[in-house]
Image (cartoon, rainbow, N blue to C red):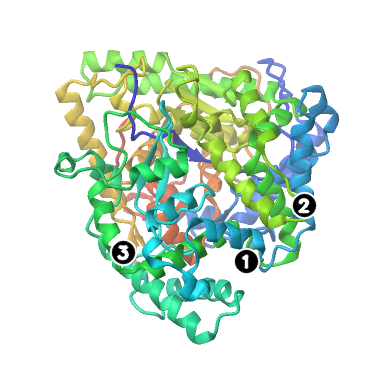
Amino acid sequence: MKQNILWAPIIVSILWMTCVAKPTVESNEDEKENLIPEDADIEFLNSYANKMKSYMNLSISPCDDFYEYACGNWKNVQPDRHGLHIRGSASDIIYTLGDVTENLLTKSSLAIDLNYEKEMQIAQKFYNACLRAELQPLPATDPAYLALIKSIGGFPAVDGPEWQADKFNWFNMSAHLTNYGAKGLINERLITVAPFAPIFLKPKLGFEYKVYSDNLVTNETEAYKVNEQRMRVYLQSFGLAEEKISEVIAGVFAFWHDVLNLNDRFPEDLTECIQKSYLRKYTQFKHWSNYFEIAWNGKNFTLDKPLACDPYYYELDKLCIKHGPSVANYLVMKLLYTMDADFKEVKYQRDYCKGSILASMPHLLGKLYFLEYSIEDTSKEIQSIINELRKSFRVAIENADFLDTRTRTEALKKESLIKSNIGCQQDDAFTHLLIREMRNLSFVDGSYAQNQINLKRFKVYIDRFNGHHNEELPEETVPSEALICMQPNAFYYIRDNSINVLSGSFHPPVFHKYWPHSLKFGAMGYVIGHELNHGFDTVGSMVDSEAEVRDWWSNESRIAYKERTECFVKHFNNYLIPEINRTINGEKTKNENIADNGGLRQSLSAYRNFIKNKINMPKSEQMPGMDHSPEQLFFLGFAQIYCSAYKMTDYWNELSDKHPTNKFRVIGALRNDEDFATAYNCPLGSPMNPKTEKCHIW
């Protein structure tokens, strides 16, 4: 049976990078690669070394808390930019790509040469309209928003007696919201393999601040206050009396409390519920046909597994009927929040508009980006790092004493057939098809609100394109996001056994051509190793070298593998996030932690072999003005990918993520790495070199 794991997404490590706008250019002739640094190289290295040092808190011992040592000052030197979500040394690549977007929108001649003149004109119109519009505060009462709200279920808080409770269907309204990217009470996630159908997870309640039972215990919590203020602003824009506003907000919170109690009774990941055999006791939830009619134009997915945890929706339905008007009020405000640019100062509007266009039209911009900026030489160097990592990974498999001969042979075969895509996956015909869809995107002169509505809906349509057309598309078609070169991302794709390093990741803090190899392997090498390891984590290990779902492990090897996996689960379960008094979920994050650990180990091994076999390499393996040895620099480069500044809301929002918070991602990987302890001379028993068992698989 060909690979059809419905619940396995593309396994992604998101790598947002900073610095230069253009991809770097390399020479790949092995012994002619600028061994003697030129003035430009030295100037850059000095500048970048100062940047690395500016992130660090040198008052902290690296053996006490390496994350604080490597990244403790980043929050004090971060650039002043608009950011709704976690800011980080790597995540700031969104601003670099925004600048590239703005530049590409001036390249009309290039678009004409590609026969995309009309599409370019559409993109330019939307961007210029965004720049001219008054976006703050959100014009919630704009006729376009009012018409949309009325068409999908109405707004009881504003409509008053005209709102007809008997005609309201919370599920239908939630289905409509998904068409605009608003995750109200239907939290849709698209499967990344054919037929690219949706599956449904628990709704994430709240606005920018996600709510849980333990952060809404009183009306004095930050989660309560931030969400209350959000709703108050929207309701005030409609001219409601203060007494009415308080009543509406109280109703929404009462509804949330009931749903949170329901959520606590079900698995955190509803895909577990979907796959449990007890689902057979339930008939399909009655409204799913409505959802597919509203959100998918009646598309019918024929699957051998359910898409949703129907028992959950039966219970949710009871609560939504109980709280009808409050549900409708919440969904309207959730829709408004999705339309809201929500920047704090006008100076951030240009950043917002750039990001909006890039997110909505990535295939056109990616096509222009790939042609405008040469990445060929950089790609060659990335490929050479991949080759070194694969050699290292094969040695790790060969030396894995918990594998028997048959399982080791299967693992080596799978590794030998891994494909690598650098820049992005290429499918010119499919990319052309996606770009041509822009011609169906309507622009309305003089109505930013209507254009915002149209743009949001278009983005969702493109995201769902594979699912809408899965019967017409070739079997080998990849998810549309895999074709977007202009994103700072790397992932392992389980369907075709490939690692993908997209061109947005060709920037610091992950890569730069002038870096010493110690830094290149510590950053980019780690990223590549991380993705290689995903092919052999608890999901990847259930798929063989031909991308078929098959358990190719012996019982003995599988048992030993699970024991090693449990080491990671227990280790990360012990990390407390003091800001929210929650611990890392070791079970949920285990595959990312396994990949971090293995990727780091194999990249260091690859670096050592690379240096050992390199001839005539006078270029220094250290950074100017830094007294770190090459291997110390290797680990510092890894850690500084994850320098970040979390707000309280970020900690709560990341609870549903399969990655640990950035600090514990770094700490957890390094505490389980003997080579790190050796490089930094951390004595056994120190915080970064505990006496407990060190976890590793490969």
- Asked whether residue 382 is in view, the answer is yes
Question: In the rendered structure, are the residues bearing label 1 and label 2 in contact, judged by CB atoms less than 8 Å apart?
Answer: no
- Within 10 Å of disc 2 (Cα), the crowding (few <14, some 14-19, many 20+) is some
Q: Secondary structure at mark 1?
A: loop
Q: Amino acid at mark 2?
A: Ala
Q: Which mark is residue 140?
A: 1
Question: As displayed, is residue 634 above or below residue 268?
Answer: above
Q: Who comes first in sequence, dot 3 or dot 1?
A: 1
Please state the horizontal and vertical placement of residue 185, each as a whole percent of the image. 39, 56
- Residue holding disc 2: 129
- Disc sitting over residue 427 in the figure: none
Judge from the rendering whether residue 690 lies leftward or rightward of residue 424; answer left or right: left
From the viewer's perspective, tell me whether residue 173 is left or right of residue 378. left
Residue 400 position in % (x across, y down): 28, 24
| Mark pair 3, 1: CA separation | 26 Å
Q: Amino acid at mark 3?
A: Ile
Q: For this rendering, which residue is in front, 124 or 315? A: 315
Residue 20 found in image quarter? top right
**Which residue is situated farthest in the bottom direction here?**
243
Residue 431, quarter of the rendered image: top right
Image point (30%, 21%), residue name: 399
Q: What x and y, as percent, mark residue 34? A: 74, 24
Q: Which residue is mark 3?
A: 321
In space, the residues marked 1 and 2 are separated at their CA atoms by 18 Å
Q: Is residue 39 left or right of residue 557?
A: right
Q: Residue at x 74, y 25 (%)?
A: 371
Foreground: disc 3 or disc 2:
3
- Above or below 609: residue 133: below
Tags 3 and 1 touching, CB below 8 Å? no
Q: How many marks?
A: 3
From mark 3 to mark 2, how far is it between C-alphas? 41 Å
Pointer 1 or 2: first along the chain: 2
